[in-house]
Amino acid sequence: MAISYASTRFDAMSDARWPTRRVNDWYRRQPWLVGCNFIPSSAVNQLEMWQAETFDPETIDRELGWAEALGFNTVRVFLHDLLWAADARGFAGRIDAFLDIARRHGIVVMFVLFDDCWNDGATLGPQPPPARGRHNSRWLQSPGHAVIASGEARERLKAYVTGVVRAFRADERVLAWDLYNEVTNGLPPPWSEDPAARRRREEALPRHLELLELAFAWARAARPEQPLTAGLWSPDRELNRRLVALSDIVTFHCYEGPERLKTLIGRLKRHERPVICTEYMARTLGSTFRGCLPVFQREGVGCYNWGLVNGKTQTHVAWTGEAEIWFHDIFRPDGSPYDPEEVAFIRELTGAGHERRP
């Protein structure tokens, strides 16, 4: 049975995105956007980063200082819906504090609101320690596949999206809103030949697509002055068509080498909108700073590698569990670089003009 991607709401939302002239004018006002996906080394997941008991401005300030010294001018940061439901005012205050720290380091922020990756069943409170030797072992889906499948919690999720976006809708410290990371990740792929897997996808897909469209509708209703996006990450052509049609700026993930990266950028530029890579850099897969950063710079494409400081997320470990060569991350927790020559190369390309802070 073929899965239909048709939706009246989708057609209406496609018409609501920024005109190409407006979004390209916005992009021309930006510097070359170069940065990383950021979580402090003291946090194992989004809840530990943001809950009042474990929010760690001292570590955030220190580590964003290291990002600044690399010449990074932006970071991509994940939020979580449970935090808003539990304490909207307190969560907004911590977001504001984080944005102040980032601004002191000359860094603007792209926030991510929903995420289909890794672990379902998020629970507020103390978070479990990292599982030894596992990449991102405690990272959390938001709101989670089970919540999406139930079709419940729509009002709570609407309050989260509209509340966060409205609170910072005109804030110059916020670069853009990435509304949904890797939508449908964790579902069986559309090319699966297993009948049971195909049925699971057919049953789950409409709910994920519905939430994607609702996220854009809710965010648009908050009237942000920043652009909206949701990134391409999968070979699913119909899903990618939908993501591009909803987004003001075209964002994508690429953990492959520079030749594949150049090909993808060429294809995405055909949409005549700004193109930004919101995830890259996996050393053992051929996605490296030396190979990819010059491509981004030549093409005028913004870029965020995954990881800054090796910490509780353990993203130096590959998806497969291998850790002989670091997969992601740039610094050890004491600020020393994993690869000093790599750091020097990054600083050369970004034009960083001051020494890395100890």
Image: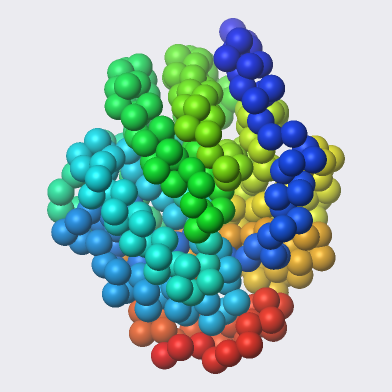
For image coordinates 37% across by 36% down, the residue present is: 163
Instruction: Tell me where residue 155 sits by quadrant.
Output: top left
Left or right placement of residue 176 versus residue 136 in this view: right
Residue 208 in the image: state x and y as whole percent.
47, 24
Which is nearer the eye, 46 or 319? 46
Residue 232 in the image: state x and y as whole percent.
63, 40
For image coordinates 20% across by 56% down, the residue present is: 52
Left or right placement of residue 323 versus residue 2 in this view: left
For image coordinates 45% across by 19% down, the residue present is: 207
Image quarter in which the N terminus is found: top right
Left or right placement of residue 341 versus residue 62 in this view: right
Q: Is residue 69 visible?
A: yes
Q: Is residue 128 visible?
A: no
Which is nearer the eye, 68 or 174? 174
Left or right placement of residue 310 versus residue 108 in this view: left
Instruction: Check the image and report above or below for 172 versus 345.
Output: above
Which residue is at the far front?
170
Residue 112 in the image: state x and y as whole percent.
46, 46
Total labels drawn: 0
Instruction: Tell me where residue 234 sits by quadrant.
Output: top right
Instruction: Check the image and report above or below for 105 versus 303.
Output: below
For image coordinates 42% across by 90% down, the residue present is: 358
